[in-house]
Image (spheres, helix red, strand yellow):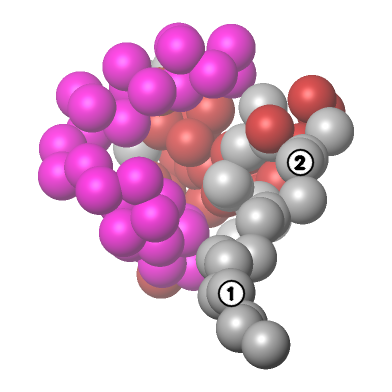
Amino acid sequence: MSLTLTAPTAPTAPAAEATASPLAPREQEALRHIASGCTYLQTARNMGLSKHTVDAYLRRIRAKLGINTTAEMTRLAVAMGL
């Protein structure tokens, strides 16, 4: 008797999940404000948050997506349709 090992296969994701954004809704909202030209303070006021929370959202976005600049975030927002 011989055993054969096979790698497990990942289940196929539905089309909606495949195109889903890796960003949380509030992160998307913060990104939309920044991409439209708002400052961190203006974004915070529009969202009812502190400037520090907006900064945390944007740091998380940069980390998740591997981007470094506001220009890259703006390009991403346009590509995402935000």
Is residue 16 toward the left or the right of residue 60 in the image?
Answer: right
Is residue 17 toward the left or the right of residue 30 in the image?
Answer: right
Residue furthest toward the bottom?
Answer: 1
On the image, the x and y values in percent for residue 58 come to: 38, 53
Answer whether residue 45 is visible to the viewer in this image. no
Image position of 5 with respect to 18: above or below: below
Disc assigned to residue 4: 1
Q: Circle 2 — which element? A: loop
Image position of 2 with respect to 21: above or below: below
Image position of 21 with respect to 40: above or below: above
The residue where tag 2 is placed is 12
Please report the residue visible at 58 percent of the width from the left and 12 percent of the height from the top: 81
Q: Which residues are magenta?
A: 53-82
- Dot 1 surroundings within 10 Å: few (below 14), some, or many (20 or more)? few
Front label number (1 vs 2): 1
Image position of 47 with respect to 49: above or below: above
Please report the residue visible at 62 percent of the width from the left and 82 percent of the height from the top: 3
On the image, the x and y values in percent for residue 51 come to: 43, 62
Mark 1: which amino acid? Answer: Thr
Residue furthest toward the left?
Answer: 68
C-alpha gap between disc 1 and disc 2:
23 Å
Is residue 4 toward the left or the right of residue 68 in the image?
Answer: right
Quarter of the picture containing the C terminus is top right
Q: Circle 1 — which element? A: loop
Quarter of the picture containing the N terminus is bottom right
Mark 2 or mark 1, which is nearer the start of the sequence? 1
Is residue 19 located in the magenta-colored stretch of the structure?
Answer: no
Please report the residue visible at 61 percent of the width from the left and 83 percent of the height from the top: 2
On the image, the x and y values in percent for residue 72 come to: 23, 27
Mark 2: which amino acid? Answer: Thr
